[in-house]
Amino acid sequence: MMTYLDCWISVATALFSQALAGEPELTESLPKPLAPGSFGFAATLAGEDEGRFSVILDGTVLDAPLMGDGADQKAGWNELLREVADAASGELLAKTGKKCRVESFEAITGESKVSRAFQLKAGDRSWTILVRDDIRAPKPAAQPDAAVAAPPVAAPAPSPAPASASTHTPSPEPSAAHALSPGIELLLDVELEATLRFGCREMPLGEILDLGPGDVVQLDRHVADPVDLIVGDKIVARGEVVLVNGNFGLRVTEVAAPKKRLESIRCLF
């Protein structure tokens, strides 16, 4: 189902090309660290989808007259991004029937994590735009505990067991951690090399030998697809690329079962 982020991307792509000078193009890219002076804005949404949605822009975008010559560039971005946030709410209603509204819109200086990254290209210049999406459907209210709400009922006294009978207490079910092979605790401190895989491609040897600086090799994965966390030759998890203190990181969205993850250890020994 279409999300608020999907609607924001659609609206921003259209409005940026219409409202900004030079008709710049918005395209997705891998996250890149922003230069000092970056700025941004955060919208707080309420309704059937709620949360915080923030946009951080490269500070050098203020040096380009995208809002027009003589205009206050930062104020122009404030107005444009507020319009995009409101229009994305309307797009979400039209596409999914979900009602939400922008309750507040404020200036911010940065974010520690990002959900998507984009490049705004105009002519031979480009600027990085980072987006963090924390918009989710609200959690349902907790239901009252029926056992607590019901009036207490006196239980009949248990019959005494015969003297010869022995009392048996059933053993608790083993947890998932204890369901692993015995002695696995001895391997928990083993250090393994983990690798992120963004994609792959088969190439003839001749094309590989012809590669040179500036050549682009297209992979088999879209920029919005999750990346793989590889241990040995096994995929143990997948997730989204994020920035952590200026370094690339992985926000895990799905993991393999513990038994499957342990299979990656076997191929290393």
Image (cartoon, helix red, strand yellow):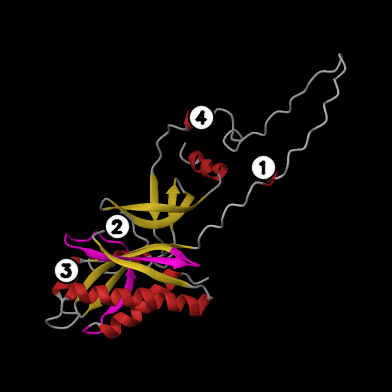
Mark closest to the chain's N terminus, 4 or 3: 3
Q: Earlier in the sequence, mark 2 or mark 1?
A: 2
Q: Which mark is residue 111?
A: 2
Task: Give the number of the disc on residue 148.
Answer: 1
**Magenta span:** 21-50
Considering only order in the chain, which callout, 1 or 4, is on the residue closer to the N terminus?
Answer: 1
Quote the CA–CA distance across marks 4 and 1. 40 Å
In the figure, is residue 48 to the left or right of 109?
right
The answer to whether the residue labelled 2 contacts the one labelled 1, judged by CB atoms less than 8 Å apart, is no
At a point 59% along the width and 38% down the height, the residue shown is 176
Magenta stretch holds residue 192: no
- Give coordinates of residue 167: x percent, y percent: 79, 20
Element marked by disc 1? helix
Residue at 63 percent of width and 49 percent of height: 144
Secondary structure under the numbered disc 3 in the rendered image: helix
**Which is nearer the eye, 23 or 184?**
23
- Percent coordinates x, y for residue 117 in the rendering: 32, 65
Q: Amino acid at mark 1?
A: Val
Which class describes the residues within 10 Å of circle 1: few (<14), some (14-19), or many (20+)?
A: few
When asked about the image quadrant of residue 105, the answer is bottom left
Q: CA distance from mark 2 to mark 3?
A: 17 Å
Separation of marks 1 and 3 at Cα, in angstroms: 60 Å
Type of amino acid at the residue the image marks with label 2: Glu
Residue 145 vs residue 44: left or right? right
Where is mark 4, residue-wise? 185
In this orientation, which residue lies closer to the viewer: 107 or 37? 107
Q: Amino acid at mark 3?
A: Thr
